[in-house]
Amino acid sequence: MNRINIISLKGGVGKSLIAFQLAKKLSINRKVALIDRSFSKTISNFFGIKDEFPSGVYWKDVGGIRIVDLSCSTSFMSLEREKIVEEYRKYKDFDIIIVDNPPLPSDQCFEMDLTSWILATNEYVYKAIPILAPPDEIIDYTMRIMLPINDFLSDLLKKNFNIKTSSRLFNPLAIIVNQVKSGYQINYDNIRKYFRDTFIFTIPFKKEVLIKHFDTDLTELDPFVEYIRSYI
């Protein structure tokens, strides 16, 4: 099972929409689960998931996707870690786990979730797709804020598992620049100075997304989906 973390350090960039669209498109020929960890529970609320893990019905099958609400809450933080480990082990037969993460990368819920994932899968590398949005000043600021993530992950391994490593743990599979208005020129060189060899995909701004939201088909993601299929 491959976990792909959809991340952004800024709200309102279309992270949840892209997470759902990727899950939907990949589920055509892969077994996919979509984990909603966002504070806003955007995906869970849209699809009518009312209960919170671990009580009640905190998941729902939508098309070929298993959507699971593992969002941060008081009840989540009060759980023994083994309970979350057991939950992740349920998805060992899934090909891909898409995780819609909250904006903050280093909160207590993040640590609880990620250490549980590591215990369940023995997978340490944090495969991620950062979602950015113009203007370039905000993109540059977001990229700079992301740089310490690798150090945070190294500290997490040392603290929780007594593992010391110099390996790169934060691995962006690609970078998506969303909501690009017609005529706007993205400074790709500025992005590549942070992650030189990472693929960069752009998605244009569409008014219909504001209306249809999850019912929108982002065809611009299709080449990216093929790239992910070839990677996994």
Image: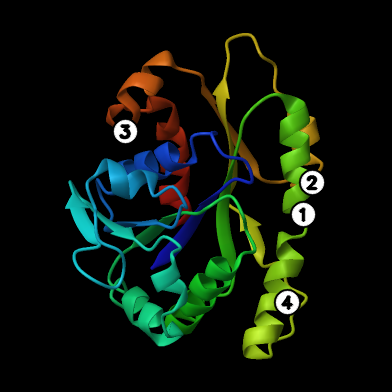
Q: Is residue 196 visible?
A: no
Image position, residue 35 (x, y; %): 37, 58
Mark-to-mark CA distance, 2 and 1: 5 Å
Type of residue at label 4?
Asp
Image position, residue 7 (x, y; %): 56, 49
Mark-to-mark CA distance, 3 and 4: 36 Å
The residue at 43%/33% (across/down) is 221
- Which residue occupies the extreme bottom position in the image? 162
Q: Would you say 5 lies left or right of 200 here?
A: left
Q: Quick one: label 2, few (<14), some, or many (20+) residues within 10 Å?
A: few
Asked whether 92 or 224 is in front, the reply is 92
Residue named by callout 4: 155
Mark-to-mark CA distance, 4 and 1: 14 Å
Quadrant in the picture for residue 8? top right
The numbered mark at residue 214 is 3
The numbered mark at residue 147 is 1
Asked whether 159 or 22 is in front, the reply is 159
- Please report contact status of discs 3 and 4: CB closer than 8 Å, yes or no: no
The number of callouts visible is 4
Q: Earlier in the sequence, mark 3 or mark 4?
A: 4
Q: Earlier in the sequence, mark 3 or mark 1?
A: 1
Secondary structure, mark 4, is helix
The numbered mark at residue 144 is 2
Type of residue at label 2?
Arg
Image position, residue 118 (x, y; %): 51, 78
Q: Earlier in the sequence, mark 3 or mark 2?
A: 2
Secondary structure, mark 3, is helix
